[in-house]
Amino acid sequence: NCIKKYKTVSKFLSKKYGSFRYKLIEKDPVVDEMVYASDCYPISLGLYKVDSYWFFKGFKITSSLIGEDTQFFIEIEYVNLRTETIRKKSVRKETLKRL
């Protein structure tokens, strides 16, 4: 079951980085009208998505349960907040130069 696997991954990340800061759930309204046998089916169609966020020692860790082409994926992303801030400033500066 995809939700069990996602919860297992989230539990491991919580053990390592502490409890997640917040969770974002995106749900298409069509899901409420659908009849399906597995909770993974709307996820695999891309109608339901779950993101959990941790912040730990200058990093933002994101765990996502996403679906595409009747498959589901668990994605873990690590973003260094310091370099992300520097990157955003340089992009903003380049955009202003173009104007």
Image (cartoon, rainbow, N blue to C red):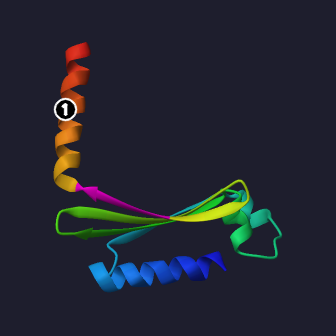
Q: Quadrant of residue 28?
A: bottom right
- The region drawn magenta spans 75-80
**Residue 42: percent from left, percent from top:** 71, 64
Which residue shows up at 71% across the image and 75% down it?
39
Left or right: where does residue 33 sit relative to residue 74? right
Q: Secondary structure at mark 1?
A: helix
Please state which of residues 52 and 76 is positioned toward the viewer in this rendering: 76
Figure check: 83 above or below 71: above
Figure check: 91 above or below 66: above
Q: Which residue is mark 1?
A: 90
Please state which of residues 32 and 94 is positioned toward the viewer in this rendering: 94
Which residue shows up at 63% across the image and 75% down it?
2
Q: Is residue 74 visible?
A: yes
> For the residue marked with disc 1, what is the amino acid?
Ser
Residue farthest along the top direction in this orientation: 99
Q: Quadrant of residue 52?
A: bottom left
**Residue 92: percent from left, percent from top:** 22, 30
Which residue shows up at 69% across the image and 62% down it?
71
